[in-house]
């Protein structure tokens, strides 16, 4: 192993990925195995010792991962919730684990709980809960260490039951969050703040709050101030969506996250004057390590800044005792320490991006500079490091965000020095705050100017659509081939071959597509989008229709970007042949603008336009601005698509357009392939259901999420489905599906699948039999033809 610490850290990471799937008993066995292998390696010959150390690292990582998962699962709060989650709000009392922050229209607080009260009874339940507080009332400031009492609902952390969606439960595990909650108003918060912080750590939240106030007073309000707070304090809560998206498109969003650049600058600002003052090397190492460690704690201790602080401390301490500071080994040591402390960090995108970018800089910058002429101001080095980081991160950026940012190769040349200026000036506003308003104002002006220039550099690419192209999830084989090409490039040998292989590997990442087997089946996926609808229909020839696009009356994020788009990209889909919007309610059309903007959409079908509906008006404006091809369809529209017959069964042609969007105006479409029919019903209720006469179907998308006013006895008799699928939110606030409706399906002998329990449900047919698979419950069922001989 040329770089043993880096290699051993990699083996530790492999074990950490497997650890959460193991029992605690298995974890203890692996600990024992790791110790045994270490003892064997002690006196073994070098070659066998290396293999023993590698195996010990894997076993240690897996054992630590199993122990971390067992500790999380044993939390009293989590155990209580899993046993019986309370339906009504409870009063949570605890201590703020971090400063509260605002996200869109909500206040977010994280509490280390002490007691949970309900029905006049309080019980001691230790754990950590993340609570979103809505409402229009003024939101109080909450600082780490404040004691808080709040009435809130409580649920175990759970995201959407689709493998492509954000792993909410995994993120909660990595953050130590055992429960999530929602509180309707800040008025139900009770906050008590200690006037005497306990110990040194107790002062940090107060100092951070003072620093935040210093920046707010020195830097004029606006996006520039928000950028300064993000870069100096790690406080990104003020960043508006437009500014953040501009940095993402430009590929310079990383400068907003506290990382190695900020820590390196802090270390440099200390190391240079200490060297000039001839402070002994050992004292220099101690001072720099202590300060960068304190800075990492001060700004919140996120993975990138902790990784950089550990590397800086190891580097300076190693220099003090004359150890060789190979940067790759330092990176491996930092990674190993972090993973030993928190194995779940291996699944954290911040950890992956931070270490991936640094590893790319270390291993690829040198080979990329070979044979390149030296440019003024060492622009050649800056360009090589920018290219190295982008090459190393390409698979991660495509998997996590489905985008690359080619503009970053050049824009980073300006973003890095400008971000350094923002950091230095921002730190200066904090340090000189006691010297008076005049001095602070000058430092604030410099921070504002540098921040403004940084924002302007990011907005250069606005209006150039091809710079913000989205890509499907890369194929695993393409990722492996690309990484092998990068490994060859990192050796510095066979430069032409390595460059050609890297270029070919990058092309495979961007343009490789999974080949869907043309098995002669019509397939329907009911995607878990919570309390909404999104159905993906695959024709026997592999083309795609999308029926609705998800959304929500409550959740303030774009379902097209967070759930539906990733689901389609994981399937390799880049074109939606037809988008059917059943009706303009937010839980059905919320993701449509994003999908039209980022996928090739053949045309959009919708029902008659309501006259005065604000949701439809907003949707109409967005689709018009995107140039979508649209058609209003009603009862009687029919045709054939890739051999599949389709017909629109609702709504009837209107006389006078309705004022508002109504559930009974939903598009209802029936698809037929062979002897099998799919009936897709939108949100129709009893009135519209009575108009569906003699419409048998093998598969029914349950109308209106299983509400009490739908799925009438008459509809079930008319359709007589074998399989019914209800798209519904977990612990639906609307009470869907209604127990009476569920009972109605069960009495009729209809197999009912639910996205809140089963996750995304996939049904396929060859025109005779049905195959049903679910994502979360992992149910697999086959429904053979009803009549012999079919």
Image: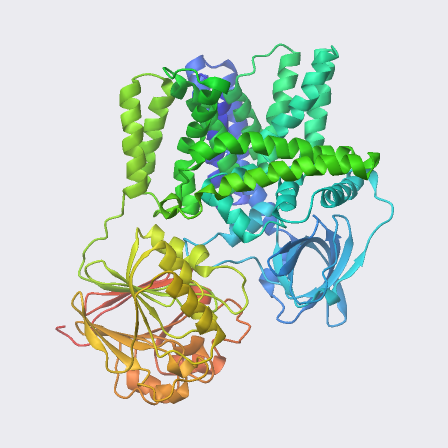
For residue 196, side relative to residue 134 (left or right):
right
Image quadrant where one finds the C terminus: bottom left
Where is residue 336? Give x, y as percent: 55, 29
Q: Residue at x 48, y 24 (%)?
A: 382
Q: How many marks?
A: 0
Can you say whether 316 is above or below 455 in the image?
above
Query: Is residue 307 in view?
Result: no
Where is residue 461? Give x, y as percent: 44, 43
Q: Residue at x 63, y 13 (%)?
A: 319
How is the model colour-coded?
rainbow
Query: Depth check: 289 or 7 in front?
Result: 289
Query: Depth check: 790 or 271 in front?
Result: 271
Can you say whether 263 is above or below 48 in the image?
below
For residue 487, side relative to residue 531 (left or right):
left
Image quadrant assignment for residue 124:
bottom right
For residue 748, side relative to residue 433 (left or right):
left
């Amino acid at each position: 192993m040329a770089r043993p610490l880096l290699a051993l850290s990699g083996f530790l990471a492999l074990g950490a990925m497997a650890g959460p799937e193991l029992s605690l008993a298995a974890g203890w066995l692996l600990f024992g195995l790791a110790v045994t292998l270490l003892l064997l390696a002690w006196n073994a010959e070098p070659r066998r010792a290396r293999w023993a150390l590698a195996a010990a690292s894997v076993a240690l990582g897996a054992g630590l991962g199993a122990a971390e998962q067992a500790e999380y699962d044993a939390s009293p709060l989590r155990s209580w919730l899993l046993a019986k989650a309370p339906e009504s709000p409870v009063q949570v009392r605890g201590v703020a684990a971090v400063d509260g922050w605002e996200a869109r229209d909500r206040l977010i607080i994280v509490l280390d709980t002490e007691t949970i009260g309900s029905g006049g009874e309080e019980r001691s339940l230790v754990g950590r809960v993340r609570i979103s507080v809505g409402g229009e009332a003024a939101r109080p400031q909450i600082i780490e260490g404040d004691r808080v009492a709040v009435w809130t609902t409580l649920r175990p952390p759970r995201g959407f039951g689709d493998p492509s969606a954000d792993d909410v439960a995994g993120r909660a595990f990595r953050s130590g969050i055992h429960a999530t909650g929602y509180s309707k108003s800040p008025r139900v918060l009770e906050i008590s703040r200690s006037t005497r912080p306990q110990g040194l750590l107790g002062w940090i939240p107060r100092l951070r709050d003072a620093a935040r106030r210093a920046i707010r007073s020195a830097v004029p309000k606006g996006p520039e101030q928000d950028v300064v707070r993000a870069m100096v304090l790690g406080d990104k809560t003020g960043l508006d969506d437009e500014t953040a998206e501009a940095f993402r498109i430009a590929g310079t969003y990383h400068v907003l996250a506290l990382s190695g650049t900020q820590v390196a600058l802090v270390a440099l600002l200390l190391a240079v004057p200490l060297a000039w003052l001839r402070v002994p090397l050992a004292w220099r190492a101690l001072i720099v390590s202590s300060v960068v460690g304190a800075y990492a704690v001060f700004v919140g201790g996120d993975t990138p800044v902790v990784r950089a602080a550990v590397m800086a401390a190891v580097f300076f301490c190693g220099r003090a005792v004359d150890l060789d500071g190979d940067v790759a080994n330092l990176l491996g040591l930092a990674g190993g320490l972090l993973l030993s402390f928190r194995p779940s960090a291996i699944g954290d995108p911040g950890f992956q991006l931070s270490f991936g970018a640094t590893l790319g800089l270390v291993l690829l910058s040198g080979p990329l500079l070979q044979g390149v002429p030296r440019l003024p101001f060492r622009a050649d080095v800056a360009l090589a490091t920018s290219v190295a980081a982008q090459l190393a991160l390409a698979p991660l950026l495509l998997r996590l965000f489905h985008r690359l940012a080619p503009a970053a190769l050049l824009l980073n040349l300006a973003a890095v020095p400008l971000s350094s200026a923002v950091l230095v000036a921002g730190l200066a506003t904090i340090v000189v705050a006691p010297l008076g308003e005049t001095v602070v104002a000058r430092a604030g002006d410099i921070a504002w100017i540098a921040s403004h220039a940084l924002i302007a550099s990011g907005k250069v690419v606005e209006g150039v659509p091809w710079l913000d192209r989205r890509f499907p999830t890369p194929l695993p084989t393409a990722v492996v081939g690309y990484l092998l090409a990068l490994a060859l490039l990192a050796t510095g040998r066979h430069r032409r071959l390595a460059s050609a292989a890297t270029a070919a590997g990058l092309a495979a990442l961007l343009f490789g597509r999974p080949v869907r087997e043309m098995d002669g089946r019509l397939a329907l996926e009911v995607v878990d989008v919570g309390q909404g609808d999104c159905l993906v229909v695959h024709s026997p020839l592999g083309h795609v229709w999308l029926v609705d696009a998800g959304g929500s009356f409550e959740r303030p994020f774009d379902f097209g970007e967070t759930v539906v788009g990733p689901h389609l990209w994981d399937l390799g889909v880049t074109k939606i042949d037809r988008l059917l919007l059943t009706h303009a309610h937010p839980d059905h059309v919320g993701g449509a603008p994003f999908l039209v903007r980022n996928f090739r959409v053949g045309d959009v079908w919708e029902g008659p336009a309501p006259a005065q509906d604000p949701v439809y008006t907003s949707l109409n404006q967005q689709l018009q601005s995107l140039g979508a091809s649209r058609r209003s369809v009603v009862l009687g529209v029919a045709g054939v698509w890739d051999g599949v017959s389709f017909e629109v069964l609702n709504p009837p042609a209107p006389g006078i357009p309705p004022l508002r969007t109504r559930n009974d105006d939903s598009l209802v479409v029936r698809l037929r392939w062979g002897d099998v029919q799919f009936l897709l019903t939108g949100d129709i209720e009893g009135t519209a259901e009575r108009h569906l006469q003699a419409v048998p179907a093998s598969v029914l998308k349950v109308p209106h999420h299983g509400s009490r006013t739908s799925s009438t006895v008459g509809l079930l008799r008319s359709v007589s489905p074998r399989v019914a699928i209800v798209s519904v939110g977990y612990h639906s606030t609307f009470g869907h599906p209604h127990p009476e409706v569920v009972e109605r399906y069960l009495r009729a002998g209809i197999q009912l699948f639910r996205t809140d329990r089963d996750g995304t449900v996939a049904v396929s047919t060859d025109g005779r039999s049905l195959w049903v698979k679910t994502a979360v419950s992992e149910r697999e069922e086959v429904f053979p033809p009803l009549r012999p001989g079919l």
